[in-house]
Image: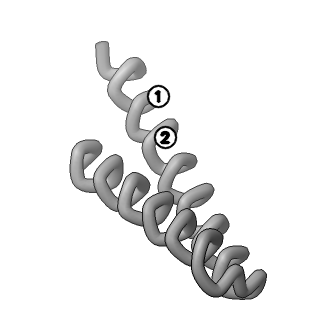
């Protein structure tokens, strides 16, 4: 699960960078940033859950 979420985070960052370099539309970049932020938060929650089970 964590690997899938991590790859989705990487994909969101790549798309965010692509939009930044090409069209630089702020609304699109903002949505992509929020998606990346949420995915990063999910990764931290998964990490905390893993530590809690140890």
Horizontally, residue 16 falls left or right of residue 50, namely right
Q: How many marks?
A: 2
Horizontal side of residue 49 vs 4, given as left or right = right
Rendered location of residue 38, percent (x, y): 57, 59
Q: Which residue is mark 2?
A: 45
Disc 1: CA contacts within 10 A as few (<14), some (14-19) or many (>=20)? few
Q: CA distance from mark 2 to mark 1?
A: 5 Å
Please tell me which residue is depicted at 72% across the width and 75% down the height of the picture: 30
* Residue where numbered disc 1 is placed: 48
Q: How is the image coloured?
A: one colour
Compared to residue 40, the image places residue 31 above or below, namely below
Q: Are marks 2 and 1 in contact (CB under 8 Å)?
A: yes
**Viewed as shown, does residue 17 lie left or right of 51?**
right
Q: Nearer the viewer, residue 2 or 32?
A: 32
Front-lying residue, 29 or 4: 29
Q: Residue furthest front?
A: 22
Which residue corresponds to the image point at 58% horizontal and 80% vertical from the top-left? 22
- Secondary structure at badge 1 equals helix
Q: Position of residue 7 (x, y in %)?
A: 29, 53
């Amino acid at each position: 699960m964590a690997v899938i979420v991590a790859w989705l985070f990487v994909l969101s960052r790549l798309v965010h960078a692509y939009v930044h370099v090409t069209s630089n539309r702020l609304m699109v970049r903002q949505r992509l940033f929020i998606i990346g932020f949420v995915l990063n938060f999910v990764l931290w929650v998964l990490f905390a859950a893993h530590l809690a089970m140890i």
